[in-house]
Image (cartoon, rainbow, N blue to C red):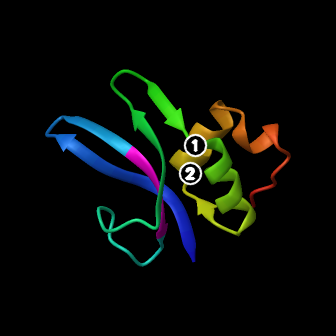
Amino acid sequence: MIKIRLKRFGKKREASYRLVAMQSTTRRDGCPLEELGFYNPRTDEVRLDTDAILRRLQQGAQPTETVRRLLEKANIIEQKGVKVS
């Protein structure tokens, strides 16, 4: 199963995250299938590749809870009418 989840990078206590599509059995910082965006919780900066995210969701990728909240906040899930169960 493919998951859309966060991949951590950055220094200690200054973490940033990349939104990536990965196999669910791959470790957190492993090799992703595709990079879909960027999230920095310290500055609330979010950059998302909307087309790639929607394509992955239509292919059946499941977002984690945190990623789901980010996508809802950016109106990506409701914006195109994609239902994620």
User: How dense is the environment of label 2, judged by Cα within 10 Å: few (below 14), some, or many (20 and up)?
Assistant: few
Quarter of the image for residue 50 reads top right
Q: Is residue 44 above or below residue 70?
A: above
Q: Residue at x 47, y 74 (%)?
A: 23
Report, in whole angstroms, how far the alpha carbon at label 1 lies from the one at label 2: 18 Å
Give the main secondary structure of the magenta stretch: strand
Tell me where residue 68 appears, x and y as whole percent.
Answer: 61, 47
- Give the percent coordinates (x, y) of residue 72: 67, 38
- Horizontally, residue 65 falls left or right of residue 16, namely right
The residue singled out by tag 1 in the image is 49
Report the quarter where the C terminus lies.
bottom right
Of the residues shown, which amino acid type is indicated by label 1? Answer: Asp
Image: magenta residue range: 18-22
Query: Of all residues shown, which one is farthest toward the top?
Result: 43
Q: Amino acid at mark 2?
A: Glu
For image coordinates 48% across by 30% down, the residue present is 46
**Nearest to the observer: residue 80 or residue 52:** 52
Q: Position of residue 63 (x, y in %)?
A: 59, 57
The numbered dot on residue 65 is 2
Residue that appears at 21% across and 41% down = 10
Q: Residue at x 56, y 71 (%)?
A: 2
42 relative to 64, above or below: above
Where does residue 54 sit, x and y in percent of width and height? Answer: 70, 52
